[in-house]
Amino acid sequence: MATTTTTELPERRRFNVDEYYAMGKAGILTEHDGIELLDGELFCKYDGRRRRFTVEEYYKLAEVGILAPDERVELLAGEIIRMAPIGSKHAGGVTQFAEEFSVRLGRRVTVRVQNPVRLSTGEEPEPDIAVLHRKDDGYASEHPGPGNVILLIEVADSSVGFDRRHKLPMYALHGIPEVWLGDINSRRVEVHDEPMAAGYARVRVFGVGETLSPGAFPDLEIPVSDVMPE
């Protein structure tokens, strides 16, 4: 079974008039761009397309105060997307996954929690867990890219459909070798691997009573019940 791509996205971050003009002052928008603000979104006057952002512009928005330091957003396909609130079960699942990999693999890997992975100039998601090739500085010098990733994990409840339809194909397109999608409502974990341009070629589902093993560490066995809270 292969995952498929889609352009459907959850709620985009909308902008007000003051933020629109602040983008002009910051040089993110220029008068030659032909960009107008309609219902909180930026569109090109000439072709009606939605204005997309690069990673550099995304950081500039934060630098000049348009994006607040505590604002829960991520950059996907050039669009600034609002992230769902983190419930207690979601947080518990993320914590348990992080502990399993940190305790069992130790300094063999670098484990980052809800931090950016830069996939391209227009995509910088923040997966719940990123298991990365070891880097002594913890990637303080730069965010990891696709070549640094061993495994990404997304823990989801209300966002599980979006993760399947958009994030998984995006990860596959950029060659992320393996992604786990933990559905805390069903207490199941989907393991997606064998990335292709159209999505992951192989999907396996594991439930309570079964164990998970990353492709890169087949000796590591993690019971689903240990990472999917009741």
Image (cartoon, grey):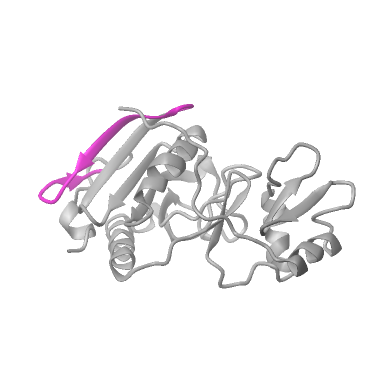
Quadrant of residue 102 within the rendered picture: bottom left
Q: x, y (%) of residue 109?
A: 40, 52
> Is 188 displayed left or right of 112 in the figure?
left
Q: Residue at x 49, y 39 (%)?
A: 170
Against 117, is 217 above or below? above
Against 174, is 132 above or below? below
- Quadrant in the picture for the N terminus: top left
Residue at the farthest right position = 32
> Is 60 displayed left or right of 153 in the figure?
right
Quadrant of residue 187 within the rendered picture: bottom left
Q: Residue at x 84, y 46 (%)?
A: 33
Q: Is residue 98 magenta?
A: no
Q: Nearer the viewer, residue 150 or 105?
A: 150
> Is 146 displayed left or right of 97 in the figure?
right
Q: Nearer the viewer, residue 12 or 90?
A: 12
**Magenta extent:** 196-214
Q: x, y (%) of residue 223?
A: 17, 52
Against 198, is 224 above or below? below
Q: Nearer the viewer, residue 158 or 60?
A: 158
Q: Is residue 213 magenta?
A: yes
Q: Residue at x 65, y 67 (%)?
A: 67
- Quadrant in the picture for the C terminus: bottom left
Q: Residue at x 21, y 63 (%)?
A: 229
Q: x, y (%) of residue 93?
A: 29, 62
